Amino acid sequence: MDEDRPPRHAGYRTRREGAGPRFRVVLVSALCVAGVLGGALVLDDPRVKQLLDFRIGPGNGQQRQPGGGPDRTKQDSVAQDNAAPSGEAGTRPAAEASLDTPPPGFEEEDAPLGAPSPPAAGSDSYRFLAVNGDGSPVGYSPCRPLHYVVNADLAPAGAEHLVPGAIATISAATGIRFIDDGTTREQPSPQRQPYQPDAYGERWAPLLIAWTTPEVAPQLEGKVIGTGGSTHFSYDDGPKTFVTGGLDLDAPQIANELLNPDGHLYATAVILHELSHVVGLDHVEDPTQLMYPEIGTPEGLSAGDLNGLFELSKAQCRKDL
């Protein structure tokens, strides 16, 4: 099993006229069996959001190692000659039988569900959190909807439209069709299982968006205001595809932010930035982009962000996952 080690990124303070440091954006990475993807918005100190990467291959099954925790390995029965060819998404081997993955192809169509318009202005000011061996970005399958649930128990007053609005923006930019599965009592966890049939049925668990606190989500300790990332699967050395993810928002901090006259703009920028991490964008060095590791003026997605999200719309369909 290969081991990817994503680079650790440093954050920088914002420069907001008339105010001190507001937000600092940090991509924080921890190491597990094959890599961790995630992002965080902080007021000062970076903290770690751990998400997982699974690889399925003959003899080693699905192995996960939440940062510092014990390995949890389930052997699978995929024979070498049945493995999906490297570099392409094929039909899932019939010999595959695992309690840790759902039946393949749930809601997967033959073509992408959405057709985003190319950005009005071209720009190469974007980066991807992960790429496949052929250089293509790792993303969600555009041929199935991405379900999401929201733990809104602690959502601050005035935040009702923030998440739906940000999701609509990301959906328009990527063509990903998001489906709101309603509210949940599930709490965020760095060891969240990507397949939870008792809670969500025979499919990948939906994206979990949680309004929470550092007491529940320790990755929000200090001045971290939000974290986000996704879990990807692959067969052997074949292409990776995201299957679920998580986005945690520090409800008390955002509640305080919403007391400011322009607080809803900054809160929206936080959610858009983290959702962009969830679907596959990394930080950039261009200060005019939302994915720059500072938020100065929350003007939304810029040309580089939009071009990167458009490229993610070209991810492979995956009837085998």
Image (cartoon, grey):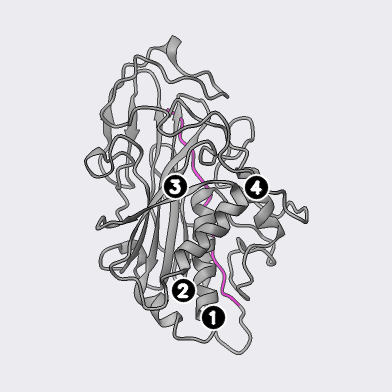
Amino acid type at image mark 2? Asp
Q: Residue at x 62, y 36 (%)?
A: 136
**Of 272 and 292, which appears nearest the observer?**
272
Q: Secondary structure at mark 1?
A: loop
* Of the image marks 1 and 4, the number of the one nearer the N terminus: 1
* Of the image marks 2 and 4, the number of the one nearer the N terminus: 2
- What residue range appears in magenta? 1-14
Q: Which residue is mark 4?
A: 116
Question: Residues at badges 3 and 4 in contact (C-beta under 8 Å)?
Answer: no
Q: Which residue is mark 2?
A: 44
Q: Give the distance between the C-alpha atoms of the residues marked 3 and 2, in whole angstroms.
A: 24 Å
Left or right: residue 14 compared with residue 146: right
Q: Which residue is mark 1?
A: 21
Viewer-side label of 3, 4? 4
Q: Secondary structure at mark 3?
A: strand
Q: Which residue is mark 3?
A: 230
Residue 300's x, y, as percent? 62, 67
* Of the image marks 3 and 1, the number of the one nearer the N terminus: 1
